[in-house]
Image (cartoon, rainbow, N blue to C red):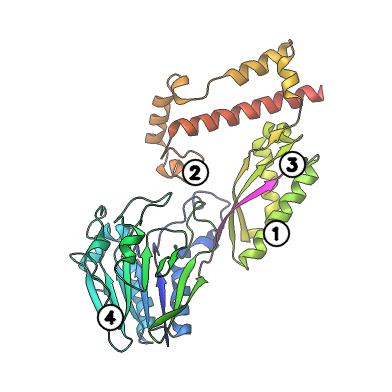
C-alpha cells in the first residue's frame, strides 16, 4: 500500500487580486498566501509519507520578479527530498511563459516531463507508470492526450496532463480533449490541471481536477486543496480531497425578503457571516456580500449605497475583526414601495421617474462613452478592469455599462422615493 498526492495550479507567488489595492485589506493574512498553501501541501506529503507528488501544471504564475520564487521552491523540494519523496510535474500555460526556469536545473528529486513528446516514467518498485507532456509554449491548441500511449499491462497507469478537457466556464481552451480520449487509453488515474475548481469528472477511470491550492480572487471561492490518493494491491482504493488554503474567498447571499427594518438587515447579515466563519475553520475570509429579495427597504438602501456598504463593513469588523475583509457589497434587492403608482402620477415626481426609467443604458446609447472608457483604460491601473472587479470589461462591455446605468437609476429613484416618502 502507498499514497501519492495530486495537485495543480499552484501559481506560486501569484498576487491575490482584488485585495492588495485596498487599504482595509488584511495584508498579514494575504502576504505569501500561495507559498503558505504550498508549504501545507509539503507538510501533508511528509505527514502521509507519500511515495510521490504529481503537479499537473501552472506551478508558477508566469515570469518571476526575482529568484526568490525559485529559492523557495528548491527549499520545499529539499524538504520532500529529505523524506525520499519524488515530484513529477508537467509545465502548464503559465509555466511556459516563465523564461527564468528554462535556464535552471530542477531540484534533484523533481522531474519536469518533456514538452517535445510524451515522456514515460516507470517506478518498478511501486508498479507504477506515469505518462505526461509539458507545454512547450504558452498556447497549446492540439490534443496532447492523443499522443499518450495505451496502458502498460500489470501496472498502475497514471496520465499527467494540463488541459481544459472539453471546456469549462471561465478557463481558456488549452490542449483540449474529450473524456473518451482519456478513457480509451486504459489508464486508471488521470491527474489533470488547469481548471481551478475541484471536479471529479469520472471514477471509472479516475479523471480528476484537484483545483488550485489557494483561491486568489472572488471567482475562486470556497475550500481549495489537493487530492490524496491511496493505492492497494495495484488498485486505487481511495481518493480524498484535502484542504490546503490559508485564506478563503466566499460569495455570500443575504435574503432580505420582507425585511422591514435596518435591524433585520443587520441581523440576517450577521447570521450569514457567522455561518461562513464557522465553515472556514479559523481561516481569514475575503467576502463579497450580495443582498437580494423584495423588501420595502430596497429604495432606502439604494439611495445611499456607500453608506450602506460602510455599515456592513463595520458589522463585519465587529464580528471578526481583521480576520474578515468584506471586499464588496452588492445590492440586488427589489422594492416594495409603490413605484408603479408613482410612475403613473401626473405630477413632477411621476414625470421625473418616468424619464429616469426611460433613460437608455447601453454602450451605443450614450454618446462618447466608448472614447471615455478607452481613455480611462489608458490612465487607470489595469487591475481596476480585471474580471474580478466592478469594472469588468474583459467580456461584454455593454453588459457592464448596462449594469452601471441600472445601479445609477436605482440609486436616483431610491433617493427620490425616500425623499418623497419623508415629505
**Residue 420: quadrant of the picture:** top right
| Badge 4 vs badge 1, beta-carbon distance below 8 Å | no
> Percent x, y for residue 168?
41, 52
Give the dominant element type of the magenta stretch: helix, strand or loop: strand
Q: Nearer the viewer, mark 2 or mark 3?
A: 3
Residue drawn at (27%, 80%), measured in percent from left and top?
153
Q: Considering the numbered disc 3 on the image, is that residue within a helix, a strand or a loop?
A: loop
- From the image, tell me which residue sits under label 3: 257
> Percent x, y for residue 396?
43, 35
Q: Nearer the viewer, mark 2 or mark 4?
A: 4
Task: Give how far apart the Cα atoms at labels 1 and 3 are.
Answer: 20 Å
Magenta segment: 245-257
> Percent x, y for residue 38?
44, 70
| Badge 2 vs badge 3, beta-carbon distance below 8 Å | no
Earlier sequence position, callout 2 versus callout 4? 4
Disc 2 residue crowd, few under 14, some 14–19, many 20+, Cα 10 Å: some
Per the rendering, the mark at residue 274 is 1
- Please identify the quadrant where the N terminus is shown: bottom left
Q: Considering the numbered disc 1 on the image, is that residue within a helix, a strand or a loop?
A: helix
Earlier sequence position, callout 4 versus callout 1? 4
Task: Give how far apart the Cα atoms at labels 4 and 1 are.
Answer: 53 Å
Task: Give how far apart the Cα atoms at labels 2 and 4 are.
Answer: 51 Å
Q: Considering the numbered disc 4 on the image, is that residue within a helix, a strand or a loop?
A: loop
- From the image, tell me which residue sits under label 2: 389
Task: Give how far apart the Cα atoms at labels 1 and 2 are.
Answer: 25 Å
Earlier sequence position, callout 2 versus callout 3? 3
Disc 4 residue crowd, few under 14, some 14–19, many 20+, Cα 10 Å: few
Earlier sequence position, callout 1 versus callout 2? 1
Residue 177 appears in the picture as rendered: yes
Residue 247 within the segment the image draws in magenta? yes
- From the image, tell me which residue sits under label 4: 153
Residue with the most extreme left position: 116
Amino acid at each position: 500500500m502507498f499514497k501519492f498526492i495530486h495537485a495543480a495550479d499552484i501559481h506560486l507567488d501569484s498576487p491575490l487580486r482584488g485585495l492588495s489595492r485596498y487599504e482595509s485589506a488584511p495584508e498579514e493574512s494575504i502576504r505569501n498566501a500561495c507559498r503558505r498553501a504550498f508549504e501545507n501541501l509539503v507538510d501533508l506529503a511528509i505527514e502521509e509519507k507519500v511515495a510521490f507528488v504529481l503537479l499537473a501544471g501552472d506551478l508558477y504564475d508566469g515570469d518571476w520578479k526575482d529568484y526568490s520564487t525559485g529559492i523557495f521552491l528548491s527549499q520545499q523540494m529539499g524538504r520532500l527530498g529529505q523524506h525520499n519523496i519524488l515530484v513529477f510535474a508537467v509545465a502548464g500555460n503559465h509555466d511556459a511563459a516563465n523564461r527564468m526556469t528554462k535556464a535552471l536545473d530542477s531540484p534533484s528529486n523533481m522531474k519536469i516531463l518533456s514538452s517535445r513528446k510524451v515522456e514515460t516514467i516507470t517506478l518498478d518498485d511501486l508498479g507504477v507508470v506515469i505518462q505526461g507532456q509539458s507545454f512547450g509554449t504558452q498556447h497549446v491548441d492540439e490534443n496532447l492526450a492523443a499522443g499518450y500511449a495505451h496502458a502498460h499491462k500489470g501496472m498502475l497507469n497514471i496520465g499527467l496532463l494540463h488541459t481544459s478537457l472539453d471546456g469549462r466556464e471561465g478557463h481558456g481552451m488549452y490542449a483540449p480533449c474529450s473524456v473518451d480520449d482519456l478513457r480509451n487509453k486504459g489508464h486508471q488515474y488521470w491527474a489533470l490541471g488547469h481548471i481551478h475548481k475541484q471536479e471529479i469528472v469520472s471514477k471509472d477511470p479516475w479523471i480528476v481536477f484537484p483545483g488550485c491550492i489557494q483561491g486568489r480572487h472572488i471567482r475562486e471561492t470556497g475550500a481549495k486543496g489537493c487530492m490524496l490518493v491511496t493505492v492497494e494491491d495495484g488498485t486505487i482504493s481511495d481518493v480524498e480531497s484535502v484542504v490546503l488554503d490559508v485564506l478563503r474567498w466566499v460569495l455570500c447571499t443575504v435574503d432580505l425578503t420582507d425585511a422591514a427594518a435596518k435591524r433585520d438587515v443587520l441581523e440576517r447579515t450577521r447570521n450569514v457571516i457567522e455561518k461562513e466563519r464557522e465553515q472556514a475553520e479559523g481561516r481569514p475570509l475575503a467576502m463579497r456580500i450580495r443582498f437580494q429579495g423584495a423588501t420595502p427597504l430596497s429604495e432606502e438602501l439604494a439611495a445611499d449605497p456607500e453608506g450602506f456598504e460602510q455599515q456592513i463593513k463595520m458589522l463585519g469588523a465587529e464580528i471578526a475583526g481583521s480576520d474578515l475583509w468584506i471586499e464588496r457589497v452588492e445590492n440586488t434587492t427589489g422594492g416594495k414601495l409603490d413605484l408603479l403608482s408613482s410612475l403613473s402620477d401626473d405630477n413632477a415626481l411621476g414625470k421625473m421617474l418616468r424619464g429616469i426609467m426611460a433613460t437608455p443604458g447601453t454602450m451605443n446609447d450614450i454618446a462618447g462613452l466608448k472614447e471615455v472608457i478607452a481613455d480611462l483604460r489608458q490612465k487607470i491601473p489595469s487591475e481596476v478592469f480585471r474580471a474580478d472587479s466592478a469594472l469588468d470589461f474583459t467580456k461584454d462591455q455593454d453588459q457592464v455599462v448596462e449594469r452601471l446605468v441600472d445601479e445609477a437609476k436605482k440609486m436616483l429613484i431610491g433617493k427620490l422615493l425616500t425623499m418623497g416618502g419623508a415629505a
